[in-house]
Image (cartoon, coloured by chain):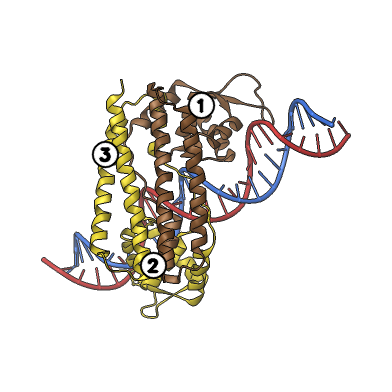
Chain colours: A brown, B yellow, C red, D blue
Amino acid sequence: MSLPHAILTALLEKPSSGLELTRRFDKSIGYFWSATHQQIYRELGKLEAEGLIRALPAQQPARGQKKSYEVLPTGRAELTRWTAAAQDPKPLRDVMLLRLRASAVVGTEGIEADLRRHLELHERQLAEYEEIEKRDFPPGKDSTEDRLRHLVLRAGIDLETFWTQWLRHALEEFAELP
Amino acid sequence: MSLPHAILTALLEKPSSGLELTRRFDKSIGYFWSATHQQIYRELGKLEAEGLIRALPAQQPARGQKKSYEVLPTGRAELTRWTAAAQDPKPLRDVMLLRLRASAVVGTEGIEADLRRHLELHERQLAEYEEIEKRDFPPGKDSTEDRLRHLVLRAGIDLETFWTQWLRHALEEFAELP
DNA sequence: GTCCACATGTAACTGGTTACATGATTGG
DNA sequence: CCAATCATGTAACCAGTTACATGTGGAC
């Protein structure tokens, strides 16, 4: 039950239409909560039906016509409640680790190339995050909002750093394998 | 499509019944691919229907009777194929980061306590992993299988280390917030 | 007028979660 | 014989994914 709250957050930052939301998810929020346009439209419908958001009065009708939404007070209240409520961290689920474990049983043939490819992907992601940090959080800016957003970006940077380091370590191990 | 391969791996390590698998998932493999007994039974049924595993001939019938499975050659081949095949890393999805981002909009009331709780949980998990490392991977043991399994455990340790450090950093930031 | 990009949606499917049902075995 | 535990399973639901459908408006 997190997608509706991701949408509420995005809409509070700026009222938007479904496609605008999709685009913004591809950027900032999507870095830690991705969503496709189908998911977003479905969820917008539900949120409107529940009275947490409403369509901005402009062009009403349906297909092909842009429809923007804004958050209602009940929606803000729900987001506030959800943000403060305790939630357990989800257990890790990682395919590469599973494959590595499987390779201990069926052999390591072929997996090394994909480890290398993943390393490249994570290096690219890390570079992108560091670019954003340089652009959006130069030293000195420190409103509460900025500090919180910077903290989230920091998690992304540190996570990608972890992966690149671990993947390099893994590749070294592979180089030594008989 | 990873649960069947997680099960194949576990069954190759040791033929087991559904409940035994569930227990072993709660330990080793479940640390990076968790599954409930319902999922496991469903998947065992599918794998048997596809001819990748078979029930060990012992007691046949149904409810209440233990039923153990072993992997057939086709199953091993499928696992080998899957392990070597390239797969893209899944984009990150983390609720706590989303909540932090939301708190930049609706206020930080209440979230700090849960950050603290998560820190404790991750510290406990880290301690557990380090215990396993001390027990199962003392310096010197280094068969290929051991090295691969150690590599996977290392990822768990480094990930939990990342989370504890990041959460401590986050709590320090909160302490400084106006 | 036709094509393409923009924009909103529907439908079917897959995988994971939650709640519950049922039979077998064993210790008291 | 009864309760607890072991063991296998069903059903309903929810969220995310994939494929496709439909309408609008502007560029050429």
Q: Mark 1 points at which residue?
A: A11
* Residue depicted at 41% across the width and 30% down the height: A150
Determine crowd level at label 3: few under 14, some 14-19, many 20+ residues with C-alpha closer than 10 A.
some
Residue at the spot of label 2:
B10
Name the residue carrying label 3: B117
The C terminus of chain B, quarter of image:
top left
Q: Distance between the residues labelled 1 and 2?
A: 45 Å
Which quadrant of the view contains residue B154?
bottom left
Vertical relation: A29 (above or below) B43: above
Task: Classify residue B121 by image quadrant.
Answer: top left
Badge 3 sits on which subunit? B
Question: Callout 1, which amino acid?
Answer: Leu
Mark 3 or 2 closer to N-term? 2
Answer above or below: position of D15 versus B138. above
Label tally: 3
Identify the image quadrant of residue A141.
Answer: top left
Label 1 lies in what chain? Answer: A
Q: Is residue B36 visible?
A: yes
Mark 3 and mark 2: span between their CA atoms?
32 Å
Q: How far apart are marks 1 and 3 (CA)?
A: 29 Å
For this view, does A149 lie left or right of residue A21?
Answer: left
Secondary element at tag 1: helix
Residue at the outermost bottom position: B57
How crowded pointer 2 is (Cα within 10 Å; few <14, some 14-19, many 20+) is rated as many
Q: Position of residue C18 (x, y in %)?
A: 37, 48
Q: What element carries label 2?
A: helix
Residue B93's spot in the image, x, y percent? Answer: 44, 43
Q: Where is residue A176 in the image (x, y as percent from the top left)?
A: 40, 66
